[in-house]
Image: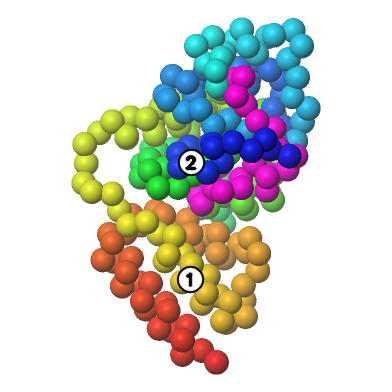
Amino acid sequence: MIDQSDKEKAPGIRVVVMEPGGPVNIGSIARTMANFGFTDLVLVGRKDSDDEGRGARVSMGGLEVYNGRRAAGNLDEALAGCSLVIGATRRARIDETCVDYREAAVIASRRAGTTTVALLLGRERDGLNAEERNRCHLLAEVPTVPGTAGSLNISHAAAIILCGIFCVGQEPGPARAADPDSLVAALDGLFQRSGSREENGRAQTIFRGLIERGGLTREEARLLESSLRFFGSRMK
C-alpha cells in the first residue's frame, strides 16, 4: 500500500516508475525531479531496497525526493488521484495516441495547476506493456535516431520531459484553459446511458486524451458539456 500523504491529494506532477531496475536509476530520477521542482515519486511492483546507499549518493541534491519516494503494489494504487496519465515511450503503435514530448509538456503543465498528472515510466529493458499503455490518456515520445542506440535510459527520458514541463511553466502565456473534468464526467454519463461504459474503458481513455489535447476554452467546454448532457437526457 502507498503510505498516505498530502502528495496524493495535491495537484502537480507525479512520476510513476514501473518495476525500477535498481537504486541508481531511482536516485537519478529523484535528482532530476528536484532540479525541476517536482517531489512526488512512486515506484511500482518491485522490492525497493538500497542497503548500500547507492541511490542516495546518486540523488545528491535530490536526496529529499529520494527519501520521500513511495511504494505501490500495483499501478492502480500508484495512479490513485491522477486525472491525467502520460506515458513515456520510444515509439507508439498505430492505434495509440502519441504526441511529441513538447506537446505533452504543454498539456501536463496546463493541467498540473488543478489536478494530479502522472508521468508513467516503463521498465528499463521492456518499457510499458500493453495493459499499462492502455491506462495512459496520452503517450509522449522523445525523438531519437533509428536503431539500437535510439532508446533512452528512463532517467534521461524523465529529465527531458520534466524539463519541458518546467520550461512551459516559466513562460508567460494566455489564461489557463478550461478544466475538463466536468466535461469528461458528462461524456462518461453519456457512455453509461448508452450502455457502453466499462471501468477504465479504452474509449473513455482515448476521448479523455483527445479533450486534454484540445486545450478547450471555458466557453467551448461549457458548450460541449451542455450538448452531451442534453443528448444524454434524450436517451431512454
Apparent side of residue 58 relative to residue 54 in the rendered image (left or right): left
Indicate the position of residue 208 as horizontal and vertical percent values: 48, 59
**Placement of the C terminus among the 4 image quadrants:** bottom right
Q: Residue at the location (55% across, 22% down)? A: 65
Magenta stretch, residue numbers: 66-91
Mark 1 nearby-residue class (10 Å; few <14, some 14–19, many ≥20): many
Name the amino acid, label 2: Ala
Q: Residue at the location (42% across, 77% down)? A: 228
Mark 2 nearby-residue class (10 Å; few <14, some 14–19, many ≥20): some
Pair 2/1: label in front = 2
* 215 vs 72, nearest the viewer: 72
* 136 versus 3 height, above or below: below
To which residue does mark 1 refer? Answer: 187
**Placement of the N terminus among the 4 image quadrants:** top right
Name the amino acid, label 1: Leu
Give the label on residue 10, or none.
2
Q: Residue at the location (47% across, 21% down)? A: 34
